Amino acid sequence: MTKGEKKQEMQREFLNHFPETVGVCVDTNKAGIVGTIDKPFQFSHELCGEKIFETVIKVPRLNQISDYIPVKASEEMLSFNLCDGQSVKVVGEFCSWSEQGRLNSYLQAEHITQCNSLPKKFNNMIYLAGRICKEPKYKKSFKKRRDITELLIAVNGKDGENYIPCIAWDTNAVFASFMEVGDYIQIWGRMQSREFYKRGELTKIFEVSMIDFS
């Protein structure tokens, strides 16, 4: 399968499982997840007179581990009853903001619908297109000695540019390590959460794990 054919296949899979993304924001930033509400929606802030609420959606992986995806949504999307443990589909765009030098990321919901069951596959998909804005950082994982390359991508969104942390693994990591600041990149992947201790403090990261890119 050629690179172009693989890209077309991934596009078909994306639209098959998240057809709502056709109408989401811009063509460079589309994401969809299916999971369960891990904590109640809480008021976050007010934007242009509109109340914004936030929660965390638990999205299971095939290996029994789960990702915990922070989600923000406007009050009008929460007109139906949403409670802890309920299964939902969320479609939107990956957003970020900087606070005290630290990048915070979340999924800004454009659509939220209730689900009857959770799929075991294709429950976490994202497409991004933008430019590399920081020198790629290549390294080996501490425990499994896997190749890893960390990237920071500038991607247009509904309300402006977002800076999105991405991570490539194994062969993808090797190829990504040769990219340069300013290079245009298209990414297919999944959103993931990670926790680790840094200088004795628990650090949580929300990023995009790259499945393929061009």
Image (cartoon, helix red, strand yellow):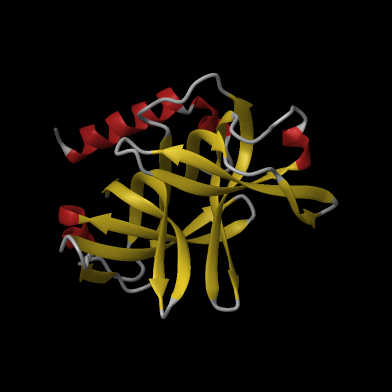
Residue lying furthest bottom: 199
The one of 214 and 78 positioned closer to us in this rendering = 78
Q: Residue at x 25, y 65 (%)?
A: 179
- Please state if 59 lies on the left or on the right of 139 as rendered: right
Residue 25 visible from this viewpoint:
yes
Q: Name the image quarter holding residue 16.
A: top left
| Picture layout, residue 20 above or below residue 173 | above
Residue at the image point whose x is 28% and y is 37% from the top: 7
Residue 133 visible here: no
* Residue 211 position within the rendered picture, expressed as x and y whole percent measured from the top left: 28, 45
- The reply, left or right, for residue 43 in relation to residue 138 is right
Outermost residue on the top side: it is 116
Q: Quadrant of residue 169?
A: bottom left
In the rendered image, residue 187, in percent from the top left (x then y), is placed at 34, 49
Residue furthest out toward the right:
49
Please provide percent x and percent y for residue 11: 36, 32
Tell which of 55 and 10 is nearer to you: 55
Question: Residue lying furthest front in this view?
Answer: 200
Which image quarter is the N terminus in? top left
Query: Is residue 43 positioned above or below 36 on the image?
Result: below
Q: Position of residue 133 (x, y in %)?
A: 41, 69
- Name the residue rendered at 36%, 68% in the picture: 182
How many marks overall? 0
**Residue toward you, 23 or 98:** 98
User: From the viewer's perspective, is residue 71 above or below residue 63?
Assistant: below
- Judged left or right of residue 95, residue 61 is left
